[in-house]
Amino acid sequence: MQLPPLQLVLLLVLLAADPASAAPAAQTQEHNRQLQQSLNDSHVHSSWIYNDVDAGFAEAKKTGKPLLVVFR
Amino acid sequence: MACLAIDGQVVRHQPSLADLLEKFVCVRVVQANGIDLSLCQFDYDLTWAVLFLNADRTIYGRYGTRASRELAKEISVEGFRKAMEGALDLHKNYPAIKETLAGKTGPAPQVKVPEAYPMLRKVGYTATVSSRNPAGGNPGACIHCHQINNNVYRSYRGVSTPIPDHVLWAYPPPNVLGLELDVNERATVKAVAPGSPAAKDGFKAGDQILTLGGQAILSIADVQWVLHQSKKEPDQLNAGVKRSGVLESLTLHLAKGWRKQGDFSWRACNGIISLLPEGSHDLTADEKKKLGLSPDAIAIQVLWNGRGFQKNDVIVEVDGQRNGMTTSDFIAYTVQKKKPKEKIALAVLRAGQEHTMQVEVREAPIE
């Protein structure tokens, strides 16, 4: 069944606005920020992705840059 | 978190590295919980390890080497910078070179993620770390990389199977073949030990190893990766070297038992299997001479009190054997020839007198 164009737009708008769909990424970010703080690992340059390899791959796909992962 | 100078320079984007770091997406991983072990394969006993990758998960190379108790002897900012340049070169030529990089991804691991190891799962380690108490009790504590190796050991000891040589003498440093590589370069030969396998195979100081076993080499860690994956004995590896600007092809021969020239006694993962977990020292030929021992004699100095040992005891006999055993060989003997809880008869020199004692082979305890 095809949705009428207006309903489709509405569905997309609702999906985009759904806080639950954005929550996991934000939660991970906040968790990692707290983890960084608790490990006293505060000297890391702001451009680094902290403790999230999947986010690194997503960023590498977006930017076309290679990935450098430090395990510490 | 122990201080490591190179780590600070890298993550702070110090000027010596910033121009290259900006060309990468940089990710810092501070615990092993949840990491994909089919992808993240490196020497888990390292204090600092780096993977260079494409967004499609193809590995360009590795950086990070340790071959002794000293923390940062085999790494340098200069060497790391050159490895980064090499990774960027490979990236520039990608995907044309994709097929040549296939060997940089390892075989399927025993488990997909560290917390899936039975012992880690049993004591409550999980995929996520509690930000409130990362170092605290389980669940919620960080899994350290060396705990992965602990559990590889357990996978053998738990079923009373000898731990194979390639697991104990893992990631062999090139010096076991007589190749001393310059830590400030990618993989340039600084010296070749006279009479060594590398010398016999024609390696010379100044050679830049560009490929080994068909893989592009960005670092000493990449050389170790190729050696680590070579489990057949004897074996041979093709090496593409640049010598005085000219490309040469050499063959590196790996004789039977080649990797056992190395020393793995520094590894943190030994803590669960070694009878000497708090440290030991293999006496030098001069030190042996002073004790009236031959150069080939067993002479392992114990550096702590415990398990029936007294600090500075020197083990001189193991189950009736008095020659040809280093600390690494001794650890290997206990986990290859003995089952957990079996006894080993030792003779030690203590204050000039020889004493005999029996020690029990350890089980691998839960952490």
Image (cartoon, coloured by chain):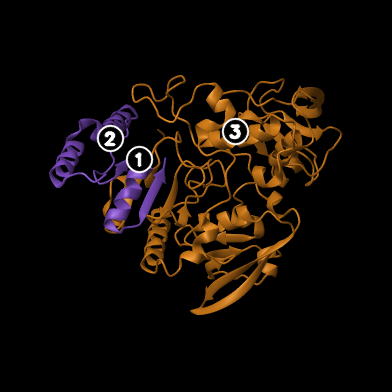
Chain colours: A purple, B orange
Would you call the spot at circle 1 few (<14 residues within 10 Å), some (14-19), or many (20 or more)?
A: some
Q: Tell me the distance, in whole angstroms, between the alpha carbons under discs 3 and 2.
A: 30 Å
Q: Are marks 1 and 3 on the same chain?
A: no
Q: Is residue B21 left or right of residue B77?
A: left
User: Please, which chain is the residue tagged with disc 2 on?
Assistant: A
User: Please, which chain is the residue tagged with disc 3 on?
Assistant: B
Mark 3 vs mark 2: give the one in front: 2
Three-letter amino acid code at the position of disc 2: Gln
* Residue found at the very far front of the displayed protein: A1
User: Please, which chain is the residue tagged with disc 1 on?
Assistant: A
For residue B251, which numbered disc appears in the image?
A: none
Q: Secondary structure at mark 3?
A: helix
Asked which quadrant contains residue B91, the reply is bottom left
- Residue at screen point 37% across, 21% down: B133
Q: Is residue A17 left or right of residue B338?
A: left
Residue B249 location, x and y as percent? 60, 75
Residue B64 showing in the rendered view: yes
Residue B155 location, x and y as percent? 65, 34
Residue B187 showing in the rendered view: no
- For disc 3, the marked residue is B151
- For disc 2, the marked residue is A29
For residue A52, which numbered disc appears in the image?
A: 1
Three-letter amino acid code at the position of disc 1: Asp
